[in-house]
Image (cartoon, rainbow, N blue to C red):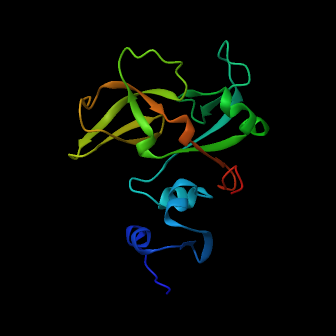
């Protein structure tokens, strides 16, 4: 059976396989979970999911952190932040060093780093919260990272207030990288 809808929630709920179209062109055909977890391009990444995936423009560079040989860092295009990605990304991204990329991260893959935490600071960025939106079972945090607004979906307890400075940690295992020019995933999936 073929069913056509413009409602992504309806498609994700009812479909076994979904065709995502943009301007009459097929962007990806896949299962609902693969569309969500392994988008092949920035269009699908931004279209599937609510709130949508955070997409940040920047470039990759060899890390400047001492004691982290082979590490990679993401440098935001507007200079707003630099984020160490850790040595485990070195081999996967080695051919992309110095090139423009788009980093994607789902809102639920961003957490608040508790004050006083001792961590190697891989995947963290310090922000001032613009909006804290408690919804009962979850909360949405909005913050500006340079010119870009990002959204985090976090547990609803112990929330900081709007205007607070917090350190957000991006789950390094759940990062997505796309070519800045084509918008296609770097993994060729």
Image-based side of 25 in relation to 92, left or right: left
Q: Residue at image x 37%, y 14%?
A: 116
| Residue 97 percent location from the top left of the image | 75, 34
Asked whether residue 78 is in view, the answer is yes
Q: Quadrant of the C terminus?
A: bottom right
| Residue 49 percent location from the top left of the image | 43, 57
Q: Residue at image x 53%, y 73%?
A: 17
Image-based side of 124 in relation to 114, left or right: right
Image-based side of 55 in relation to 108, left or right: right
153 is higher (above) or lower (below) than 63: below
Asked whether residue 98 is in view, the answer is no
3 is higher (above) or lower (below) than 44: below
Q: In which image quadrant can residue 174 be found? A: top right
| Residue 79 percent location from the top left of the image | 57, 29
Q: In the image shown, does 130 or 8 lie closer to the viewer?
A: 8
| Residue 118 percent location from the top left of the image | 45, 14
26 is higher (above) or lower (below) than 43: below
């Amino acid at each position: 059976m073929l069913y056509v809808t413009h409602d992504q929630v309806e498609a994700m709920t009812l479909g076994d396989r979904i065709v995502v179209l943009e301007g009459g062109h097929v962007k990806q055909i896949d299962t609902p979970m693969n569309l969500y977890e392994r988008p092949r391009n920035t269009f699908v990444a931004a279209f599937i999911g609510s709130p949508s995936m955070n997409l940040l423009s920047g470039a990759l560079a060899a890390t400047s952190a001492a004691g982290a040989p082979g590490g990679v860092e993401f440098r935001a295009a507007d200079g707003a932040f630099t984020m160490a990605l850790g040595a485990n990304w070195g081999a996967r991204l080695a051919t992309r060093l110095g090139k423009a990329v788009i980093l994607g991260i789902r809102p639920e893959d961003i957490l608040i780093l508790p004050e006083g935490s001792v961590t190697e600071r891989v995947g963290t960025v310090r922000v001032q919260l613009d909006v804290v939106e408690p919804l009962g079972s979850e909360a949405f945090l909005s913050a500006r990272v340079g010119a870009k607004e990002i959204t985090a979906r976090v547990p609803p307890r112990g929330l900081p207030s709007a205007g607070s400075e917090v350190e957000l940690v991006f789950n390094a295992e759940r990062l997505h990288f796309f070519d800045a020019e084509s918008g296609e995933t770097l993994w060729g999936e």
